[in-house]
Image (spheres, rainbow, N blue to C red):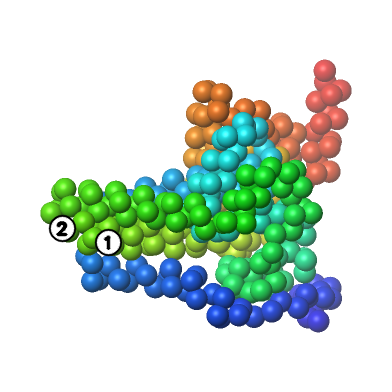
Amino acid sequence: MTVQASDTPVLKEKRRRPNWKHEVGFLLIHLSPVLAFFSGATLIDWAICIGLYFFRMFFITAGYHRYFAHRTFKTSRWFQFLLAFFAQTSIQKGALWWAANHRTHHKFSDTPKDPHSSKVYGFFYSHIGWIMGPDFKNTRFDLIKDFAKFPELRWLNKNHLFPALVMMLAVAGFGGWANYAVYDVSFFTGAWSALFIGFALSTVVLFHGTFSINSLMHKIGKPRYETGDESKNSLVLALVTMGEGWHNNHHYYQSSTRQGFFWWEIDPTYYVLKFLSWFGIVWNINKVPYHIKFSKNLEHAKQLLNKSRKAK
Ligand SMILES: [Zn+2]
Ligand SMILES: [Zn+2]
C-alpha cells in the first residue's frame, strides 16, 4: 500500500514482472534496425519508414481506438475488417485485445484497476511495463462482446501477427525491386534494408508513438476539462500521433470521433475519416456537442444544456 500526496490510501494491484523468454521477439524488433549498418539504407527505405509510420498510425487511432474501443463512427463489415487488419500490421496485438484493454483504461482511469496508469504504477510501467508483463496478455472478450461476435475479427485477434507478416513480405518485395531498379543493389540487399529501416524502425517508432499516449499524455501538457484523471492535451503529441494528443478532450467526451474539439487542434485522423465519409466508406461520425465543448466540467455542461433549452 502506498500513500498519495493527498493522503488518500491507494491499494495497488500486484503487477508481475515480464517473463523475458516471452519478450524476446519484442526486444529483437527494437534491435533489428541496427542491422541496417550492414545492409545500408536508401532514400526509398526511409520513405517507406515514414510512409508506413503515418499509414499505420492512422489505422491505430481510427481503427483500434476511435472505432473498436469507442465506436465513434460506423462503417461496413469489409472496412471494419480492413481497420483491424492494417492496425494489426503495427504488431500491437489484436484489435479485440487492444480495444478491450482501452475500455478498461477509461473505466478506471488513473486508479489501481487502470492497466497503464503512470500515476499509480509509474511512468515506465505505463509506457511499456504493462505490455511486457504477463498480466494483460489475454483478451477480455467480456469487454468487447460487440465486436467479438464477428468470426473474422476473432480470427485476426487470434492470429494477430498475420497482418504484420503480410506487410513484411510486401515491404521486402517492394524494397528489393525498387532498390534494385534505382540503386542497382542486389534484390536481397534491397529487401533486407527495406525491412530493417522501412518496416522495423517504423514499427519501433510506432510502438513508442502509441505508447506515449498511455504514458506521456497522462503526464505532460495541459488539461482543458476537469475529468478527474491525469489526462492532458498536447499539440506536439497530436502531431506525432495524428490527433491523439488531445487526450484530455477525449477523456472528457469519448464518443466524439474528432478529438481536436477546436479548429486549431490539429487532428489528421479526423480529417482522413471525414474524407472517407464523402465516399460513404464511413458514416455517422460523432461530433462534440456545444454544451460539452464550452464547459469546464460535467456540472457546468449540464447548466449550459439547460440554459440552451430554456432559450429555445
Ligand atoms: Zn480512448
Ligand atoms: Zn488516457
Q: Amino acid at mark 2?
A: Val
- The CA distance from mark 2 to mark 1 is 10 Å
Category of crowding for the residue at label 1, using alpha-carbon neighbours closer than 10 angstroms: few (below 14), some (14–19), many (at least 20): many
Mark seen at residue 185: 2
Q: Which percent across, then down, holds residue 35?
A: 30, 71
**Screen quadrant of the N terminus:** bottom right
- Give residue 116's quadrant in the image: bottom right
Q: Secondary structure at mark 1?
A: helix
Residue, x 44% and y 63% (percent of image)? 204
The residue lying toward the viewer, choosing from 57 and 2, is: 57
Mark seen at residue 193: 1
- Give residue 138's quadrant in the image: bottom right
Q: Which percent across, then down, holds residue 221?
A: 57, 57
Q: Is residue 222 visible?
A: no
Q: Amino acid at mark 1?
A: Ser
Q: Which percent across, then down, holds residue 77?
A: 62, 34
Q: Is residue 20 above or below residue 56?
A: below
Q: Is residue 255 visible?
A: yes
